[in-house]
């Protein structure tokens, strides 16, 4: 990101100086100041906004700190909002106003039931001084019994690694393997052994490959066999675990209020990032956050150190609350038999009121595509193009801006944040 781009944004802004407009309160300290045009932008904030989190900059020559929309899950561990938070006095109330005046962290006064907007404009020039540490995050028990669904065809070595990832957990989930026409003798012998295990189902269903239909069938079998199941773990057969202890964090995050889906951080075998959440709208459809970046890449506002909200995550390793699965009626196996079924599912679950999260504490290796390498074929290519077109048509991804990415980001790059000059300022958003 080039330095000085905050000044470039201010020059393109509405101009003018002055204090926050009447009816607004803030927790800026001595040495902090409003950036040019900030007052005018706050004055036209949507009336339903009880608070506004703004981008900020640590000086006039510094790069702005670009932020996502309101993310209460991230704020439990990382105060990405900082001091650039503005409250409508009527939403803050007398007690909140008193706490703010006494030096309370602005983020501590944001509540999940408050309509919080994001102003993608470096509205605050921060003076010296560090923010205090965020309070300890709440301790949540895991959501409850989990059943894993693993689609598979042949690939016995990959499948064994995926099963080892499950069996290495302190409380391994129940298991459903949905097979798509395996004919390898080693795989069939493995199935025979697995069928004798407790809380394990292997169903062989030779049919044209339809990943979404296989997942749906696995969910149907799991919920029928184990009615006590509270969450479904969708796991590709090409996943392995570099270390145990990856599932428990996902279960704890799934227990957070409103969370219906939790994804994991996936690495390529060379330990670069394969998936750190899905950016809806990349390439007119969707793409993986930080793909190809270093394993320790911090992400926007350092969020790769803590669970945080996303619009979508991949189903290669996805934990789904039972109620969210049922609210969205599972995957759409007709419209998205192979690709984008996970993105479509997350967006439909979101429309039904369930949030999607990524928990980067859950780290897995994804041997992407290892079990389904194929030569180019025109029918396969056209089928994938139909799925891309369906995602665009159903969810408007050609013009959709992901809530949890900055509108200043150049989405032609996934492995880093590249500032994109814009002809006009992006609007305040929720």
Image (tube, rainbow, N blue to C red):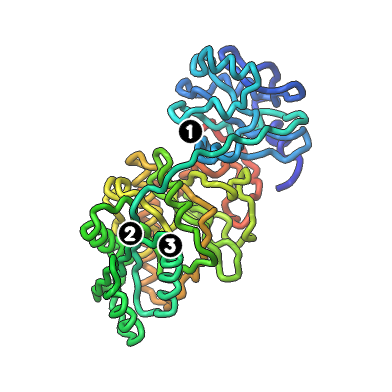
> Which numbered disc, 2 or 3, marks the residue that appears first in the sequence?
2
Q: Horizontal placement of 41 versus 345: left or right?
A: right
339 w.r.t. 269: above or below:
above
Confirm or deny contact between disc 2 and disc 1 (CB under 8 A). no
Q: Position of residue 229 (x, y in %)?
A: 29, 53
Read off the residue under disc 1.
430
Going by the picture, which residue comes out furthest to the bottom?
185
Based on the displayed image, in which of its 4 quarters is residue 118 positioned? top right
Distance, label 2 to label 3, CA atoms, is 15 Å
Which residue is painted at 28% across and 78% down in the image? 181
Mark nearest the camera among 2 and 1 is: 2
Label 1 environment density (alpha carbons within 10 Å; few <14, some 14–19, many ≥20)? some
Which residue is painted at 43% across and 70% down in the image? 162
> Which numbered disc, 3 or 1, marks the residue that appears first in the sequence?
3
Q: Position of residue 179 (x, y in %)?
A: 30, 73
Read off the residue under disc 3.
316
Which residue is painted at 46% across and 75% down in the image? 370
- For the residue labelled by badge 3, is the local secondary structure a helix, a strand or a loop? loop
Label 3 environment density (alpha carbons within 10 Å; few <14, some 14–19, many ≥20)? many
Foreground of the two, 360 or 329: 360
> Which numbered disc, 2 or 1, marks the residue that appears first in the sequence?
2
Based on the displayed image, in which of its 4 quarters is residue 127 positioned? top right
68 w.r.t. 339: above or below:
above
Q: Position of residue 237 (x, y in %)?
A: 40, 70
Read off the residue under disc 2.
147
Q: Position of residue 76 (x, y in %)?
A: 54, 38
Residue 375 can be seen in this image: no
Foreground of the two, 270 or 21: 270
């Amino acid at each position: 990101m080039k330095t000085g781009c905050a000044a470039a944004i201010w020059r393109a802004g509405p101009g003018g100086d002055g204090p926050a407009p009447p009816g607004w309160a803030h927790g800026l300290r001595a040495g902090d100041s409003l950036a040019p045009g900030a007052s005018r932008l706050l004055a036209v904030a949507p009336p339903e906004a009880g608070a506004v989190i703004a981008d900020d900059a640590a000086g006039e020559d510094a790069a702005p700190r670009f932020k996502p929309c309101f993310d209460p899950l991230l704020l439990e561990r990382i105060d990405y909002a900082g001091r650039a938070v503005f409250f409508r006095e009527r939403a803050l109330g007398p007690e909140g106003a008193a706490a703010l005046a006494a030096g309370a962290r602005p983020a501590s006064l944001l509540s999940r039931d408050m309509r919080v907007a994001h102003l993608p404009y470096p509205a605050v020039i921060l003076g010296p001084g560090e923010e205090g540490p965020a309070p300890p995050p709440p301790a949540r028990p895991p959501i409850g019994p989990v059943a894993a669904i693993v689609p598979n065809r042949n690939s016995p070595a990959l499948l064994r690694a995926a099963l080892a990832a499950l069996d290495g957990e302190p409380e391994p989930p129940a298991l459903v393997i949905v097979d798509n026409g395996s004919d390898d003798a080693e795989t069939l012998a493995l199935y025979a052994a697995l069928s004798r295990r407790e809380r394990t189902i292997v169903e062989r269903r030779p049919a044209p490959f339809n990943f979404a239909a296989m997942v749906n069938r696995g969910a149907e079998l799991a919920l029928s066999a184990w009615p006590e199941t509270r969450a479904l773990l969708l796991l590709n057969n090409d996943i392995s675990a570099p270390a145990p202890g990856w599932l428990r964090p996902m279960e704890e995050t799934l227990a957070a209020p409103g969370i219906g889906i939790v994804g994991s951080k996936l690495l390529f075998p060379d330990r670069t990032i394969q998936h750190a959440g899905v950016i809806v709208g990349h390439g007119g459809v969707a793409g993986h956050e930080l793909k190809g970046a270093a394993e320790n890449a911090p992400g926007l506002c350092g969020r790769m150190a803590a669970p945080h909200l996303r619009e979508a995550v991949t189903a290669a390793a996805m934990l789904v609350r039972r109620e969210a699965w049922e609210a969205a009626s599972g995957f759409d196996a007709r419209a998205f038999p192979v690709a984008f079924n996970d993105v479509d599912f997350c967006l439909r679950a979101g429309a039904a009121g369930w949030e999607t999260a990524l928990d980067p504490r859950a780290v897995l290796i994804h041997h992407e595509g290892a079990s389904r390498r194929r030569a180019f074929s025109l029918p396969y290519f056209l089928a994938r193009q139909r799925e891309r077109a369906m995602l665009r048509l159903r969810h408007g991804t050609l013009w959709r801006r992901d809530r949890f990415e900055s509108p200043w980001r150049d989405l032609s790059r996934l492995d880093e944040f590249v500032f994109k000059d814009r002809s006009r300022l992006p609007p305040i958003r929720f």
